[in-house]
Amino acid sequence: METGDEEDTTNYQIFPEEFATHFLNVPDEFIPECEKIFSLEDETNHWQNAVESTIIKDYYTVKTKPEQCKLFLRIINAVLDHAEGNPVVQNRFPGFSRTLQYAAHERKSPVENASIFPDIMGQVVIEGQPNAEASWERSLLPLEFKRTSTASDAISHAGKWVRQSKQSRSSKAAISSGSKGDYVLKSRSTKSHSQGQKRIPTGSLSQNSTKRTKEEQQASDDSDEELGPTYEDQLAMYCLEMVSTGLRVHAYGILIDQGNMTLHHFDRDGWVRTSSFNVFDQWGMFTAILVAFSSFDAHQWGFYRSLDWDRSRCMIPIVDQATTLGLNPPSLIIHCEKGVPEDYRLERHDRITPVEEYSDLNKLRTLTSSNISDIDNTEPGFARVTLVQKVYIQCGLTGRGTVLFLIKQDNTAGEPGIVVKISSQAIQRLPERLYLRIAKQGLIKSNSEHVKNLPVFIGWAQCQQLSDGPRGKLPGSGKIEKGGNSDRRIDIHVFPYYAHIYTLPDEATFKKAIRDCVGCSYDLYRFLQLLHRDISSENLMWDSKREVAILNDFDLAKLVPEMQRGPYAKHKTGTLPFMAIDLLNGWSGEHQYRFELESFLYVIMWIVVRYEDGKEKYDTLRRWLAKRPLTVKLEKIALLQQLDSFLAIPWTQSATFPNIYKSWILPLRMILSQFIRDSEAAQESKGFGNQQQSSYDSEEVSFEIKEFLDVLMK
């Protein structure tokens, strides 16, 4: 499900030279050197012939493909063959190898239900497995070709290029009108709120709630209409497939249009691309880029730095295909939390092979000297865990990109009930583990029975930040400043692998689970002023070992005093189908506890009308899955304020939940609807009419939290 918890995606355009320098580490002097190394002058006709008639190697196959793709594939492999053993290449790029090999594939994905495969893909070769089946997990560099011209045009252009003299091919990109600084483009502003700035709510629960404008109706009707993807979209989808394997923080791609190339970099903040340059006119640039990509190590390709694996067999970590390819999956070193129940404790070692900065507890203390919580709550020693299977991925190139892997320890059979959670978090946010410690310690001190409804936190590790990568070196507006608003860190946490409450097979257990999760959220709010801020069907869980409900995933949690100091970034908070109407309407004030309760109501509605016997069976409320917040908002408003729309929903169609409509849905909907009507009346009495107002939490109108809770606890 789509989660609206992130900033707008940023989009930057830079020069190819800047990309080569800051992303690929190409020295300026290497580009003219490549003009000479890969010269196509008359005195080196053997090289010209190699480009034009390179034989098909065992490591790629060409079937019925457009001539443009065939030509480029021959050129790429001929360039890299020619680079092998060249002393200048080896001196500039000691890591150069043919481990990254390019192939043209049928336009069919190797992964079921995934998008089609790119025209050409650079993939990692596995030692001893030269003919291993193509997979997104081993894919590193997709090349997509535009189909705007005929194949004969491409061949004609290529033939003309081969005959050009070196003097006519400049090693510098042509600069359009305006200064170089003016040419760096950004599609959307990411200017953040200043720290401490008072935020005024920009939306309201009842604004225009009963009347749809023509524009709103059109948005509702057309919100799910899919337009055909552009070639840039298609390239982004390939990179999404690669990032969705779960171990990468960024990805690269190349788009080619009749010899004109653009380079693309996608990470958790956004998208950086180059202006177009012609590979035939800028041959030195093109060949230098190919050499640089073939010199990348796993970290330069975006793989997490805290992973450890056998690099002698494969240059990148492999999880899903590890068994098939005869590889060992990657492992992590975990710092173990104190006070973990015995059945969830990891086996610790006093001395183990270090992985980079996590080498010993003294180094840990140095790294986290500003974070007393980690030092006070971490056991001595370390645990090594191996990633076994990916069980969840939050799909998306930008944002948190949360992924869960089942783990095992060392060479044992492992504990199938434990997962590693890896996510990319905004750098200014406190890690999830700190909120969980605050919650646990606070509820214990408050004698709350709902401490049992918090997830068991087993351990943690921390990885690199986005600013440690190439975006941290980029000049201008595309740069990610260390600790800035666009910076993110990779958080790694270990938890039990819980079941979702929608899998519960009977109504009584489901109602108990909902009550416990609501009770936990309310105690966190009233005792600690801690808000969860992402109540959804995916975050309400069931611990089958202890037979208790779990309020899970505190990634977006915040203390009320934090929000009063101002936002870290501009974003909506929550999962779209379950977000409160105010949030869908653009609310930018402090998060309210009533938003949590409203989300609980939507979760109840969703599960009751879609699930039966623990499985999703019905398609009711499917419009809540729309991609646009406006569409979801209008659907919810109709449900709350139009009786016909509400009664049209088959609330009792699931045999698992025969009584929840009368006991919960009907009275809770009445409470929320009354609040909307009272808010509208208060707005009109103050002369706002259909204008926005600053807040509905006034003395005249307040949300009856106790009344809402009383209904749920019956």
Image: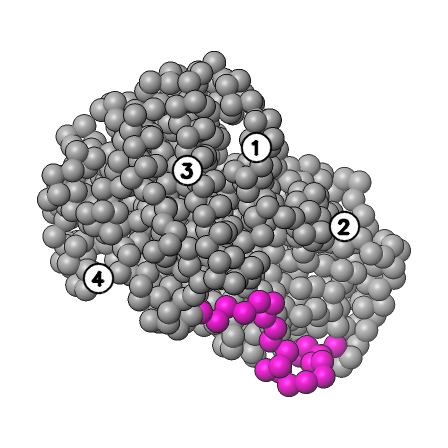
Which sits earlier in the primary sequence, circle 2 or circle 1? 2
Disc 2: which residue: 70
Q: Secondary structure at mark 1?
A: helix
Q: Amino acid at mark 2?
A: Lys
Residues marked 3 and 4 touching at CB (< 8 Å)? no
Q: Which residue is mark 1?
A: 643
Q: Quadrant of the C terminus?
A: top left
Please tell me whether residue 510 is drawn above or below residue 170 in the rendered image.
above
> Label 3: few (<14), some or many (≥20) within 10 Å?
some
Residue, x 37% and y 54% (percent of image)?
A: 700
Which numbered disc covers residue 367?
4
Tell me which residue sits at (43%, 65%) in the image: 200
Q: CA distance from mark 2 to mark 1?
A: 62 Å
Q: Residue furthest bottom?
A: 179
Q: First in sequence, mark 3 or 2: give its number.
A: 2
Disc 2, SS: helix
Along the viewing direction, whichever of 602 and 192 lies nearer the viewer = 602
* Range drawn in magenta: 169-192
Amino acid identity at mark 1:
Leu
